[in-house]
């Protein structure tokens, strides 16, 4: 529910209705500007009759937000949210942000080679899996804590911010020490215990869409994190599971447009997991830029034939450099910037 006060309303009138709502155990989110006083009412407002609130002096308009996700809703906040990472990196504005690196952290040498190359090509963040939740229990599961330390070390050397996936809530303190952006993988999108815990973190959260999740379910997962107090969320469309088997998943590129209508949160695309094929990544990346996404997270490997995971969907270093050149050309036409 959104309440707008009259232009000539007083601070006392505002405080009176806010105190009333707080007594009813609602949370108040003030989104006022210099021109207008507006605030959101967070909680189950289904029993609250909007007409009753007009009894309070100074109230101009009361509007129900029909979506179950309140804090993530575009109705609740009209202005786009911009997430600040570090080194001047912002996601959600006119910068098309690139996160690049291998599926898995395999060794210090591997990470240094890849990080230096993607940095030279113009990437803003280094991605890499230290913990690897895999479909098979026999597949490579990652270097875990040692992987986090390697990411931090290489990130410090190259000046790249770090993004990596967290598998469970107990690891949050460790990730806060070594990581700049904490990624929630597709299979954990509805791990509500983890989402609640991440709501207490100060780190930005990259929230991937679940394998078969609707857009509303995805935004409700973001709401879980925001309800805990952490509003620094980047959504990531990474393809959903359909009946099609030619590609690894089906990239729902229309989700970018839907999210931008429904929510103020920034959204990026993962073309690597969407296609599962390296030769499709460049075209899907260009389409992502054209449709209005705020960035990409791309898998890159210097020797994909011998990668410990997802080599088939990883760009070689020269292919990633070419992708960045192509993105540069398109971004200049769209009024965005890549490098």
Image: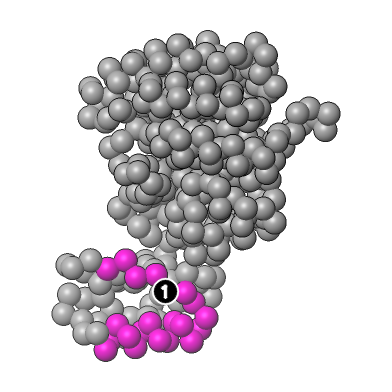
Tell me: residue 227, above or below residue 74.
Answer: below
Identify which residue is drawn at 24% across, 84% down.
Answer: 11
Quadrant in which the N terminus appears? bottom left
How far from the left and from the top, in percent, is residue 274? 57, 25
Identify which residue is drawn at 78% across, 27% down.
Answer: 139
Q: Is residue 17 left or right of residue 109?
A: left
Identify which residue is drawn at 70% across, 36% down.
Answer: 143
Give the magenta range: 12-32
Q: How is the image coloured?
A: one colour
Q: The residue tagged with tag 1: helix, strand or loop?
A: strand
Q: Is residue 258 visible?
A: no
Tell me: residue 250, above or below residue 97.
Answer: above
Q: Is residue 331 visible?
A: yes
Q: Is residue 56 left or right of residue 152?
A: left
Q: Nearer the viewer, residue 156 or 125?
A: 156
- In the image, is residue 21 part of the stretch drawn in magenta? yes
How far from the left and from the top, in percent, is residue 255? 47, 35
Q: Nearer the viewer, residue 1 or 221?
A: 221
Q: Is residue 186 left or right of residue 268?
A: right
Q: Which residue is mark 1?
A: 28
Number of marks present in the image shown:
1
How far from the left and from the top, in percent, is residue 121? 38, 21
Quadrant in which the C terminus appears? top left
**Crowd around label 1: few <14 · some 14–19 · many ≥20 (10 Å):** some
């Amino acid at each position: 529910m959104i309440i707008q006060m009259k232009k000539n309303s007083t601070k006392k009138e505002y405080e009176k209705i806010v105190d009333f709502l707080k007594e009813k155990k609602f949370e108040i989110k003030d989104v006022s500007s210099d021109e207008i006083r507006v605030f959101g009412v967070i909680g189950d407002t289904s029993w609250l009759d909007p007409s009753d609130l007009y009894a309070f002096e100074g109230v101009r308009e009361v509007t129900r937000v029909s979506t179950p996700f309140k804090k993530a809703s575009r109705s609740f906040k009209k202005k786009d949210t911009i997430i600040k990472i570090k080194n001047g990196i912002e996601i959600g504005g006119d910068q098309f942000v690139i996160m690049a690196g291998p599926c898995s952290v395999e060794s210090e040498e591997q990470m240094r080679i890849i990080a230096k190359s993607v940095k030279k090509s113009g990437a803003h963040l280094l991605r890499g899996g230290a913990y690897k939740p895999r479909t098979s229990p026999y597949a490579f599961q990652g270097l875990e804590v040692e992987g986090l330390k390697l990411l931090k070390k290489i990130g410090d050397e190259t000046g790249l911010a770090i993004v990596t996936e967290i598998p469970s809530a107990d690891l949050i303190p460790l990730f806060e020490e070594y990581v700049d952006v904490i990624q929630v993988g597709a299979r954990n999108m509805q791990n509500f215990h983890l989402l609640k815990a991440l709501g207490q973190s100060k780190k930005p959260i990259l929230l991937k869409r679940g394998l078969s999740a609707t857009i509303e379910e995805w935004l409700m997962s973001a709401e879980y994190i925001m309800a805990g107090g952490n509003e620094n969320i980047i959504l990531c469309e990474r393809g959903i599971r359909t009946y099609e088997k030619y590609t690894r998943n089906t990239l729902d590129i229309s989700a970018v447009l839907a999210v931008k209508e429904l929510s103020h949160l920034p959204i990026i695309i993962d073309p690597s997991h969407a296609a599962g094929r390296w030769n499709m990544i460049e075209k899907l990346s260009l389409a992502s830029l054209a449709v209005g996404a705020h960035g990409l997270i791309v898998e890159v490997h210097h020797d994909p034939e011998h990668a410990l995971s997802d080599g088939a969907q990883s760009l070689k270093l020269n292919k990633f450099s070419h992708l960045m050149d192509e993105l540069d050309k398109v971004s200049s036409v769209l009024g965005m910037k890549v490098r």
